[in-house]
Image (tube, helix red, strand yellow):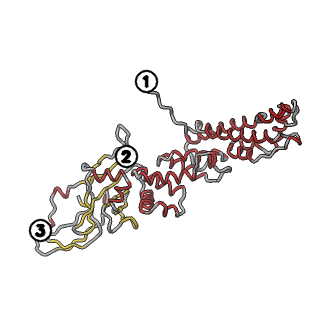
């Protein structure tokens, strides 16, 4: 079976134009990586489709040479295919079809960066078809039907693959751009490119407490998109940052007329918000205890101390007044912002019925530990805690 290339004029002897019935009934093999088998492992299968490409008419019965114009390549149903404006290189050595778009690319480059293409090109059981680049010259031709692969994503992937990462980093790329690259790289096993795109996404949606912005950034749609990217492109490390951006936003940023989140995601966020509220209330319920240095100093002075942390009769009233004054209850859906407020908190010193320097430093350390505890425990209500592997009892 021959997929015709660029339209061209070709003179041939009519006697050489006779097509065998076998050639006329040829079939095109279609690469299919959808996970439709019983094992669900997504292995590529071969699906044969009737050939619908146009055949040039042949005029017989004359020795005069005839002129024939090769038709544009066509896909199933006889619909014409389009060559990509940029990624159809004149010196390309292989033609790949994604959707209804043809890409003429460099086989060596694809093989060096993608284990998917490396295995495809080496598989004797999935031979390439012929693509007529110009009269008398053919190139290997593959039709890809890979689950999750979009033409626009493949374009972005080729941009990254054709340019050094250093040069590509200089471009102004965002959440959707890196997501497209990561999706295509995951589908086609561009391992290094996927790792790079995943790292860029992780910088946008960090998962460590210290890197999370202390206030909502308003990227609600981007956060919802990031959760889908995490699933489609196998980039789970961006989930926590994206979840938290939604978690601390009123109504999770949802619009009743145009909801962004699935019911499952909404329920996950609801559970996580309940956890945030409960955890934050325990932080505000009582002040941290008196520091060991303050206790030692008090003992050395014969039990005399003016630090409010010396007993609950003094520390609780002071702490309750501070919570109300600083409006710390307002951070019940956003403990990250709440812990930042505690970090910046200024308290009266012991000369003004406040706490001593040793206790103030100790309280700050206690809140820092609480912040880490909160962030680590948030994984469970968000469903990010790894499932324990059952011990091998055999």
- Mark 1 is surrounded, within 10 Å at the Cα level, by few (under 14), some (14 to 19) or many (20 or more) other residues, namely few
Of helix, strand and loop, which one carries label 1?
A: loop
Of helix, strand and loop, which one carries label 3?
A: helix
- Mark 2 is surrounded, within 10 Å at the Cα level, by few (under 14), some (14 to 19) or many (20 or more) other residues, namely some
Residue positioned most to the top: 394
Task: Read off the residue under disc 2.
Answer: 34
Which circle marks residue 393 in the picture? 1
Side (left or right) of 47 relative to 158: left
Q: Residue at x 31, y 46 (%)?
A: 45
Side (left or right) of 9 relative to 13: right
Residue positioned most to the front: 300
Task: Read off the residue under disc 3.
Answer: 15
Of helix, strand and loop, which one carries label 2?
A: loop
Which circle marks residue 270 in the picture? none
- Mark 3 is surrounded, within 10 Å at the Cα level, by few (under 14), some (14 to 19) or many (20 or more) other residues, namely some
Q: Is residue 150 above or below residue 324?
A: below
Nearest to the eye among marks 2 and 3: give it.
2
Nearest to the eye among marks 3 and 1: give it.
1
Give the mark nearer the N terminus: 3 vs 1: 3
Spot occupied by residue 347 in the image (x, y as percentages of width and height): 82, 44
Q: Is residue 57 above or below residue 35?
A: below
Tell me how far mark 3 sits from mark 1, CA to CA: 75 Å
Q: Do tag 2 and tag 1 residues touch (Cβ < 8 Å)?
A: no
Q: Residue at x 67, y 41 (%)?
A: 371
Q: Residue at x 61, y 38 (%)?
A: 376
Give the mark nearer the N terminus: 2 vs 1: 2
Tell me how far mark 2 sits from mark 1, CA to CA: 35 Å
């Amino acid at each position: 079976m021959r997929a015709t290339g660029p339209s061209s004029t070709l003179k041939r002897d009519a006697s050489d134009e006779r097509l065998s019935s076998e050639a006329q009934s040829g079939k095109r093999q279609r690469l299919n990586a959808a996970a439709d088998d019983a094992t669900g492992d997504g292995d590529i299968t071969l699906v044969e489709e009737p050939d619908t490409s146009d055949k040039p008419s042949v005029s017989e019965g004359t020795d005069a040479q005839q002129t024939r114009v090769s038709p544009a390549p066509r896909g199933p149903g006889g619909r014409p295919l389009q060559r990509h404006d940029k990624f159809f290189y004149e010196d390309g050595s292989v033609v790949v079809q994604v959707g209804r778009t043809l890409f003429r690319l460099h086989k060596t480059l694809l093989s060096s960066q993608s284990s998917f293409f490396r295995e495809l090109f080496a598989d004797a059981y999935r031979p390439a078809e012929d693509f007529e680049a110009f009269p008398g010259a053919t190139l290997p031709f593959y039709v890809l039907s890979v689950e999750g692969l979009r033409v626009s994503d493949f374009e972005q992937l080729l941009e990254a693959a054709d340019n050094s990462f250093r040069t590509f980093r200089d471009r102004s790329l965002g959440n959707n751009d890196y997501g497209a690259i990561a999706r295509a790289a995951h589908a086609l096993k561009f391992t290094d490119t996927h790792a790079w795109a995943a790292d860029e996404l992780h910088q946008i949606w960090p998962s460590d407490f210290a890197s999370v912005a202390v206030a909502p950034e308003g990227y609600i749609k981007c956060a919802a998109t990031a959760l889908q990217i995490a699933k489609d492109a196998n980039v789970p490390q961006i989930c926590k940052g994206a979840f938290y951006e939604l978690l601390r936003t009123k109504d999770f940023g949802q619009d009743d007329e145009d909801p962004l989140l699935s019911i499952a995601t909404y329920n996950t966020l609801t559970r996580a918000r309940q956890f945030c509220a409960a955890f934050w209330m325990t932080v505000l319920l009582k002040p941290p205890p008196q520091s060991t240095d303050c206790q030692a100093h008090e003992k050395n002075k014969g039990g005399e101390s003016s630090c409010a942390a010396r007993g609950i009769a003094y520390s609780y009233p002071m702490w309750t007044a501070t919570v109300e004054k600083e409006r710390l209850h307002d951070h019940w859906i956003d403990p990250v912002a709440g812990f930042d407020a505690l970090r910046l908190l200024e308290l009266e010193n012991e000369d003004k019925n406040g706490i001593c320097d040793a206790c103030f430093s100790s309280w700050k350390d206690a809140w820092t530990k609480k912040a880490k505890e909160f962030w680590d425990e948030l994984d469970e209500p968000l469903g990010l805690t790894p499932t324990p592997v059952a011990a091998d009892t055999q």
